[in-house]
Image (cartoon, rainbow, N blue to C red):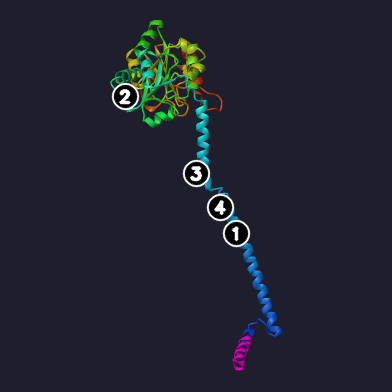
Amino acid sequence: MKNFSNKFGGKNNKDYKKKSDFGYYSKNTNRSEKNDRFLNNSANKNVENLKKNDKNDTFSSLKRKNPRFKSNIEFPYKKNSDIDQEFTNKRNYDDWIWGKHSVYEALITDRAINRIWCTSEIFSSDKFYILLKDLKSKGVLIEEVSWNRLSQLTYGASHQGVALQLACSKTISLQQLIDFSKHNCPNPILLALDGITDPHNVGAIIRSAEAFDCKGVIIPQRRSAGLTGTVAKVAAGALEHLHVSRVVNLNRALEELKKNGFLVVGLSGDSQISISNFLEKAPLVVIVGSEDKGISLLTQKKCDFILSIPLKGKTSSLNASVAAAISLFYLSGK
């Protein structure tokens, strides 16, 4: 038992000496000071690294908690939802009718209609096909849409596959407008709109046209605002005293007007002919284009004259309704 303890103790002493060389419990003060400096420096470096890591971890955690740049998907969705909600609140359904029976009764009673949305099943049914085809030939815009699209337009109403928007005034055919204008005036002036989709502009043009004794306004079936409540409100009663013809194709309508002795005059800021120098007194059709694109190239080819309104200021163009009013002032005084 004694030998075992000595042997064990001896081994421990050797191990202790070996370990003391590494500065754990060494009696060598110089070596211990060096090791202390080494340990202190390494400890300081470790503390600095930990601080840096803590800062990086804090910054990365802030990134994870506040994904400021990750929200490109979320914010637009919220913004669009707010816009949709605002649009829903502003839309007025007083002039809308939906449902098979309600729409059918409105169609057979010859009410003024601006636009119709229907599914393919409704358009191809025997009950609606002839009525819808006849309305389309008269200029009513008929759009074939899916069931889901119609549900979006009516915001989940029970539409049964069809909905329509009533017009504030009835329209007449192009031939009726030609006969009426020539019967009441030897040199009538008609106004044709090309691509004016803003109802405020259409209403203001109708108001100016009636004020300057224009005999009628021609509106294409597509790429134009219809005779909605906004148009009637901006027109301020002029729509009740002015004939409007809604045509399927504006260029074909211009050809028909030419056959009936009308001169087609277009308004464009690029023309070299001033409207003040235009002296023709034949029946006229004045075409007003949209503010951004003007008269389309195909429609310009149908024009007999292209006139410009002389501007003296730095403004390069006029509002469509203002241009229409100025041109009618010049041409009606010839």
Task: Indicate which disc, 4 or 2, sits on the residue closer to the N terminus.
Answer: 4
Q: Give percent across and percent down for residue 66.
A: 58, 49
* Residue in view at x 70 percent, y 86 percent: 28
Q: Do the residues labelled 4 and 1 touch (CB within 8 Å)?
A: no
What is the three-letter code of the residue carrying label 4?
A: Arg
Task: Indicate which disc, 4 or 1, sits on the residue closer to the N terminus.
Answer: 1
Task: Point out the residue furthest to the top here.
Answer: 184
For label 1, count other residues whose C-alpha is less than 10 Å away and answer few (under 14), some (14-19) or many (20+): few
Q: How many angstroms separate mark 2 from mark 3 (CA)?
A: 39 Å
Q: Mark 2 points at which residue?
A: 123
What is the three-letter code of the residue carrying label 3?
A: Ile
Q: Which of marks 4 and 1 is in front?
A: 4
Q: What stretch is highlighted in magenta?
A: 1-17
Q: How many angstroms separate mark 1 from mark 2 (CA)?
A: 65 Å
Label 3: which secondary element: loop
Q: Residue 64 carries which label?
A: 4
Label 2: which secondary element: helix
Q: Are marks 2 and 3 in contact (CB under 8 Å)?
A: no
Q: Give percent across and percent down for residue 248.
A: 35, 21
Q: Give percent across and percent down for residue 113.
A: 40, 17
Q: How many angstroms separate mark 3 from mark 4 (CA)?
A: 16 Å
Q: Mark 3 points at which residue?
A: 73
Q: How many angstroms separate mark 1 from mark 3 (CA)?
A: 26 Å
Task: Indicate which disc, 1 or 3, sits on the residue closer to the N terminus.
Answer: 1
- Describe residue 103's horizontal placement relative to residue 235 as left or right: left
**The N terminus: image quadrant:** bottom right
For label 2, count other residues whose C-alpha is less than 10 Å away and answer few (under 14), some (14-19) or many (20+): many
Q: Name the residue under label 1.
A: 56
Task: Indicate which disc, 3 or 4, sits on the residue closer to the N terminus.
Answer: 4
Quarter of the view holding residue 130: top left
* Residue in view at x 65 percent, y 67 percent: 47
